[in-house]
Amino acid sequence: MTQTTFPLSQAVPGQTVRLARIEAGKKLKHRLTELGLTPGVALTVIQDNGGPLLVSVRDSRVALGRGMADKMFVIED
């Protein structure tokens, strides 16, 4: 059974998701990898007030712009 992926920007606060893939250029992929955002990692959306998305990943909190979150595809965990 395959799970449907959706952009991280559509996840709701309190939801835990797993990063499936990043559809972005080399620079952005590299930057996100440095932040610990690699395929398979679990993310929890902490805050979404219409601006940057605040997510918890590997015991850290990371603020991601809407554009970045739109390029990160996740599945429900």
Image: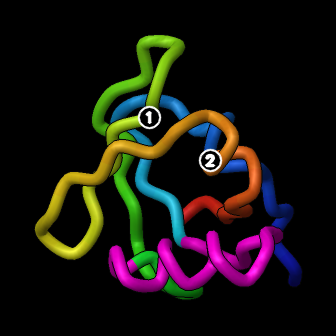
* 37 with respect to 44 (left or right): right
Residue 7 in the image: above or below residue 59: above
Count numbered badges in the picture: 2
Residues in magenta? 19-36
* Residue visible at 42% across and 13% down in the picture: 49
Task: Provide the residue designation for mark 1.
Answer: 53
Where residue 38 appears, as percent x and y from the top left, is 50, 85
Residue 29 in the image: above or below residue 55: below
Residue 20 belongs to magenta span: yes
Q: CA distance from mark 2 to mark 1?
A: 7 Å
Evaluate if marks 2 and 1 touch, with contact meaning CB atoms under 8 Å apart: yes
* Residue visible at 79% across and 69% down in the picture: 24
Residue 73 in the image: above or below residue 6: below
- Asked which secondary structure carries label 1, the reply is strand
* Residue visible at 15% across and 63% down in the picture: 60
Q: Amino acid at mark 2?
A: Ala
Q: Residues within 10 Å of mark 1 (few under 14, many from 20)?
A: many
Task: Provide the residue designation for mark 2.
Answer: 69
Quarter placement of the N terminus: bottom right
* 73 with respect to 13 (left or right): right
